[in-house]
Image (cartoon, rainbow, N blue to C red):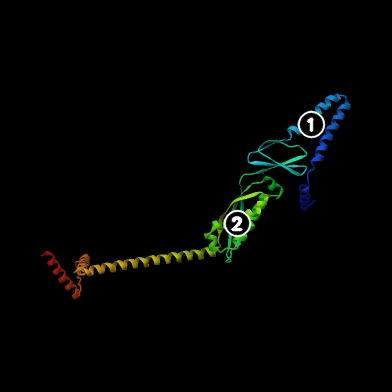
Amino acid sequence: MNLEDFNFNIKNRSNRSPNPIGSLVGTMLFLVVGAVALANSGVFSGFSIFFWLLVLLVLIFGLGGLRVVDQYDRGVMLTLGKYTSTRQPGLTWIFIGIQTMQKVDLRITTVDIPQQEVITRDNVPVGINAVVYFQVESAEKAILNIKDFTLAVSQYAQAALRDVIGGVELDALLSERVQISEEIKKIVDEATMAWGINVTDIKIQDIELPADMKRIMAKQAESERERRAIIIRAEGEFTAAEKLSQAAERLANVPGGLSMRTLQTIEKINPDPSKTVIFALPIEFMEGIKTLGDYLKQKTK
C-alpha cells in the first residue's frame, strides 16, 4: 500500500459517522451472553447474575455518563444526531450511546493572520499581517452552522484584509490604520454573525514595504524636513526685519538716536592694537551729533 492509499483510507475513516446505537446494542448483547454463560455454568444463580448485571449497567450508564462543563464552556447536546439543548456550566449527565456533547469555549480567542502580500490602489506591493479577536456568543450556532469556526474566521478575515487594502492608497494605509482595521472588522463581523460569533477587534500589526519604496520615502521625508527648515528660517528673518524696521523708525524719531547707535557699534569694535581702523562717517552723522548736543542743552536748562 502506497502513501496515497494510506491517506485515503485515513480520510475515509475520519469521515465515517459514529454508530452509538450499534455500540450500545453490542455492549448489552455482550453482557447478556456473558450472563447466560454464567447461569448455564451453575456458578451463580439466575437472580444473582441478574442483580450484578443490573449493577454493572447502572455503573456503566450512570457514572460513565457524568460530564463537567467548565464556567467558560457551553455543552451542545446532540441526541441521535439531532440538537436538543445547550448545557450550562456545572455537572451534567448524558445517555451514553444515545447522546453526545461538544464543548464550546466562550472566551475571547486570538487568531493570527499570516503575512499577506497585497497590492494597494496605487500599485505598491506591501506585506501585512494582522490579528483577529473574536468570541463565541451562540454555542449551538458555532457547532451547527459552521464546521470549524476558528479556521473560517481566519480565512474570512484574510480575504477581507486583501479586499480592503487593495482599495486604499499607500499613504492612507500608513496614516489611517485604525480606520482600515475598523472597516475590516465590520465586514468580518457581518459574515460571522450567522455563525454565532462576535468579532471584537482586528489589529493590523506590521506593514512591510519594498526596499526601493523605503528609500524613496526616506528622501521624501528628508526633503520635507528641509522645506520646513527653510520656511522657519524665512519666517525668522521676516520677523527680525520687522523688528529692525520698528527699531530704526523709533531711533529716527529720537534726536541723535541713530548717531548714538553708531557710536555704540564703533565702541564694540576692538581691533588689534597693531592695526589702524579708519571709519568714514557721513556728514549726517555729524549733524546728528550736533542735534543730540542741542537736545541735551535744552534738557539741562
What's the residue type where badge 2 is placed?
Ile
Residue 62 % position (x, y): 75, 32
Tag shown at residue 57: 1
Dot 2: element? helix
Q: How many marks?
A: 2
Give how far across and how far down residue 55 sits, in percent.
78, 28
**Residue in the picture at 37% in, 66% down:** 235
Q: Amino acid at mark 1?
A: Leu
Task: Give the mark toward the camera: 1 or 2.
Answer: 2
Q: Quadrant of residue 20?
A: top right
Is there a contact, CB below 8 Å, between mark 1 and mark 2? no
Task: Pick the residue in front: 187 or 264.
Answer: 187
In the rendered image, which quarter is residue 281 located in?
A: bottom left
- Front residue (pair 295, 290): 295
Residue 184: numbered disc: 2
Outermost residue to the bottom: 283
Task: Judge from the rendering whether residue 236 lies leftward or rightward of residue 289; answer left or right.
Answer: right
